[in-house]
Amino acid sequence: KVPYQMQELLLFYFFLLILVNYSISPLLHYFLPRGSGIVTRRPLVLQLVNSITEYAEFLHFKGRKFTNFDEVRQEIEVETDRVTGINKGISSIPINLRIYSPSVLNLTLIDLPGITKVPVGDQPTDIEYQIRDMILQFITRENCLILAVTPANTDLANSDALKLAKEVDPPGMRTIGVITKLDLMDDGTDAKNVLENKLLPLRRGYVGVVNRSQKDIDSRKDIKMALSEERKFFLSHPAYRHMADRMGTRHLQKELNQQLTNHIREMLPPLRSKLQSEMLALEKEVEEYKDYRPDDPATKSKALLLMVKQFSVDFDKRIEGSGDQVETLELSGGARINRVFHERFPFELVKMEFDEKELRREISFAIKNIHGIRQVGFVRKFCLFNGGNLCFNQ
């Protein structure tokens, strides 16, 4: 097994499990803010640590241990409002939270905002695209797993979470599906085909969960009781009883821990190879500067030549339009030269007035003079350039 200290380091830096939060996560909803509309307005980097004692720590609130999870929820809301304002604004600046508890397994997740279609409060008109870009910023990383959470009482084909996951992970290799609100489906309907991975197949499959309702949370329903009732729901439901051992919040925790560990094993060898290659390249570069002396004239000359060479390359790219950055507000570089030659220059030529007879006479003299004592054969282009220069000078 991967040692916990190594696992935690890898999770935090390379193998963050991404939670695309269309509805609230079954693992996190016990202490995360809940409500209508957009509630998660900043990414929440959440580290779950299995521990004998139960408490929480915020990175922005070092030194304080939160033992009351209602206070954790309040602090998340306060810290969110501090950056985004109190009127539903959003921000990509993450909140970092670590949870220690005997009821969790070692995991690192990122809770992301759900897609909202209509702006409210101080939200910009392009709120949908801003949230979408924020989510894609995280889930495009190849080393991350995507936890796509979708409520069962909505059409799975229209799931924003699965749609975004499909964009960055078409084969479904990195995506784990989670189906919530199974207890709220209409009578006579079920999500059996989805949970059996038949409707929209994912390599890592789906897990169904039943969360506490807002009423249960308001009445402070015990978490152990909620988990027990969730277990009874799957065992007693005719569509789910045959897969009850693969459903529920506890199974989801174990499954995520196992899947993430397996993912680390798969990705670690190429990652190690890549890091070693980069380290060797850096060591080689450092070796080149071993005898570097800033006051050495030869070093200064070399640095100046490199700067001039780079300027020349950048200038060429600017003229050719092949640079890394493209100006969107105005014409620049080669595009401005192109406009002068193809728009302004023809217009100026039409306005020119010159004596055609005199021009022909001057070109004739130029042709004869450039051939000297030789008989005139082919006309050299230099003669025409001379004639053109006369026009330009006018």
Image (cartoon, rainbow, N blue to C red):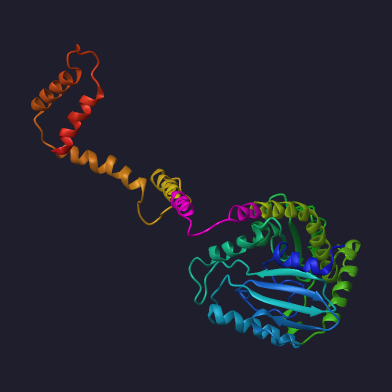
Task: Name the image quarter holding residue 34.
Answer: bottom right
| Most foreground residue, 66 or 103 | 66
| Residue for point 17% across, 13% down | 373
Task: Name the image quarter holding residue 111.
Answer: bottom right
| Residue for point 32% across, 47% down | 336
Residue 323 in picture, x, y percent from top left = 46, 48
Residue 385 in picture, x, y percent from top left = 22, 29
Q: Is residue 276 left or right of residue 344?
A: right
Residue 292 in picture, x, y percent from top left = 55, 57
Query: Quick one: quadrant of the C terminus?
Result: top left
What main secondary structure does the magenta stretch of the protein show?
helix
Q: Magenta segment, which residues?
A: 282-307
Task: Examine the structure image and report whether residue 202 is included in the region drawn in magenta.
Answer: no
Q: Is residue 340 left or right of residue 200?
A: left
Query: Quick one: quadrant of the N terminus?
Result: bottom right
Q: Is residue 197 left or right of residue 232?
A: left
Q: Residue furthest front?
A: 296
Q: Is residue 181 visible?
A: no
Q: Is residue 177 visible?
A: yes
Q: Is residue 41 left or right of residue 177?
A: left
Image: 83 above or below 11: below
Image: 152 above or below 214: above
| Most foreground residue, 362 or 321 | 362
| Most foreground residue, 343 or 208 | 343
Task: Name the image quarter holding residue 54.
Answer: bottom right
Residue 334 in picture, x, y percent from top left = 36, 45
Image: 331 above or below 381: below
